[in-house]
Amino acid sequence: MELTPAEKNLKNLLQTWMLILGSAGVFFLFFGNQLLISINKVSTRFFPKLPLINEPSEFFWLTLTLSLMVVLIFLCYWAQKDIRRNIDFVIPFLISKFVSTFFFFVFYFKQGYSLAYLVGVISDGSMFLITFYFYKKVKWET
């Protein structure tokens, strides 16, 4: 049976997230510290009153970040492989993006309005909202 337009859109979105998350994971692995340094430079130039985020000196959190990214890639893969049968794999993806957005938001205020946390709100929040929209479109059809 052919996919509905909403199912096709969600499948394409999940494939896009797989590509973005995979690329971001490789980037974080090799250039993660540079990303934070760059965000701090942008913050210093355009938002000089905002505090800077501390640059990590070890790889403990990077390990957890990369493992979660791999899990999210596989959730997207399994869901898009058979979007009708596996649509529930989108739910843990949504939960993950909601939780990360929530805590980026909390830490943005708790840690003194650092631009890095705002970048997290924007990136993960966008992924959550876009995915939720396309997920709900599929659910509304059924």
Image (spheres, grey):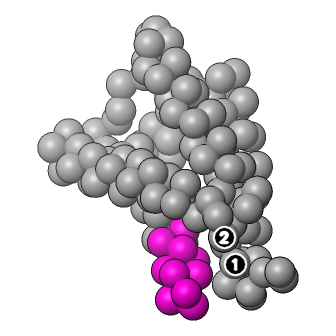
Q: Is residue 57 above or below residue 36?
A: above
SS at mark 2? loop
Amino acid marked by disc 2: Arg
Q: Nearer the viewer, mark 1 or mark 2?
A: 2
Q: Does residue 93 appear anywhere in the picture? A: yes
Residue at image mark 2: 84
- 29 or 129: nearer the eye? 129
Q: Is residue 16 above or below residue 8?
A: above
- 60 or 15: nearer the eye? 15
The x and y percentages for residue 98 are 36, 57
Magenta region: 130-142
Give the number of the disc on residue 7: 1
The x and y percentages for residue 46 are 44, 54
The x and y percentages for residue 48 are 35, 47
Q: Which residue is drawn at 66% across and 70% down?
A: 84
Question: Viewed as shown, does residue 34 lie left or right of 100?
Answer: right
- 64 or 71: nearer the eye? 71
Q: Which residue is drawn at 78% across and 81% down?
A: 3
Crowd class of label 1 (few under 14; some 14 to 19; many from 20; radius 10 Å) = many
Q: Which residue lies furthest to the right in this view?
A: 2
The x and y percentages for residue 80 are 72, 60
The quadrant holding residue 142 is bottom right
Q: Which residue is drawn at 46% across and 58% down?
A: 91
Say if mark 1 contacts mark 2, CB within 8 Å.
yes
